[in-house]
Amino acid sequence: MAGVTQQMIDQTEDGMRLDRWFAIHFPNVPFGRLQKLLRTGQVRVDKGRAKTSTRLSAGQTVRIPPIDDAPPKPAGPKINENDAQFLRDLILYEDNDIYVLNKPHGLAVQGGSGTKRHIDGMLKSLPNKKGEAPRLVHRLDRDTSGCLLVAKTRAAASHFGKVFKSRSARKIYWAVTVGVPNPKQGQISCFLAKQATRDGEQMVVVEQGVEGAQHSTSHYSVTDTAGRDFAWVTLKPVTGRTHQLRVHMMELGTPILDDPRYFNLDNWNWTRPDDLGEGLHLHARRLALPLPGGKRLDITAPLPPHMEKTFDLLGFDAGRYDVQEADVDET
């Protein structure tokens, strides 16, 4: 860069931290060098001094000093073509802003202790035109399958994050429960908190006011039954607490089939049919939400193989009842 320049912040960068913005536009400038440029006033925002944590607003200008002597740009992360193709095969919907993926059962959305392979890590293999990895907008449990929204840009992530927080995104889940909920349609509302239990740390129902307690609400409706042993339940979470639907079904006394954490029917005298699918029977079936420009997206994800196997065994006809899946009472 030959001399001092002024660079304007565009709408897609509104709210971005200055250090993040600098890393995108000038990846050859290390963080320590940026700090020095800020301390000495060589980098400024709207002619004023700034910090690495300064949040930028659309229309502001950033003063960029000559930085020709900066170290060469480090090599970017190597794109894994196998991961890229794996993710492409999961795409249910794509436009300029988002992907909707059909997340498989058993695949983590984010990394954690001992988790090396996860959606968030693989997204680095689908960079956008600026070289940025797509961003998660919401989460699904490792063993929950179905619709997962991913934003291609930071601006899209911010927009759809607000959509989810405003509860204008409609999420419909399918589950197979052990036992039939009574009544067959209703609302579950309680406070949940993460606590240590004999089975390890998990979400438990607590009284209001308990430290860490968060209110949770879900609507449910029994779509079909297989005698008294199993039910196909349609679920709509109103709030989005960790393991919310799984805990709510446990509270009704009808836990989700093969739930490794919340299946607590200690005295349940039942022999499991050999031909049932194996794995948590909870699927994010449908996602409906407004898109920029006024249109509305409404997408469904096909059942994972283990749930399809169970549906076939129990005589649940997904095609016959699919039209009714959104008819969960929200009154």
Image (cartoon, rainbow, N blue to C red):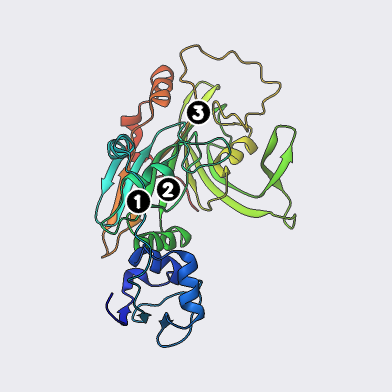
- Nearest the viewer among 325 and 284 is 284
Q: Position of residue 324 (x, y in %)?
A: 36, 40
Q: Quadrant of the N terminus?
A: bottom left
Q: Earlier in the sequence, mark 3 or mark 1?
A: 1
Q: CA distance from mark 3 to mark 2?
A: 20 Å
Q: Residue furthest front?
A: 69
- On screen, 257 above or below 119? above
Q: Earlier in the sequence, mark 3 or mark 2?
A: 2
Which circle marks residue 76 in the picture?
A: 1
Nearest to viewer (mark 3 / mark 1): 1
Q: CA distance from mark 3 to mark 1?
A: 50 Å
- On screen, 145 above or below 45? above
Give the amino acid type for the residue marked by disc 2 in the picture.
Answer: Lys
Crowdedness of circle 1 by 10 Å Cα count: few (<14), some, many (20+)?
few
Which circle marks residue 231 in the picture?
A: 3
- Residue 286 in view, yes or no: no
Q: Position of residue 235 (x, y in %)?
A: 48, 41
Q: Earlier in the sequence, mark 2 or mark 1?
A: 1
Measuring 50% from the left and 28% from the top, which residue is drawn there? Answer: 231
Measuring 73% from the left and 41% from the top, which residue is drawn there? Answer: 196
- On screen, 275 above or below 89? above
Q: Is residue 281 left or right of residue 197?
A: left
Q: Is residue 17 left or right of residue 62?
A: right
Nearest to viewer (mark 2 / mark 1): 1
Q: Position of residue 55 (x, y in %)?
A: 46, 74
- Nearest the viewer among 330 and 20 is 20
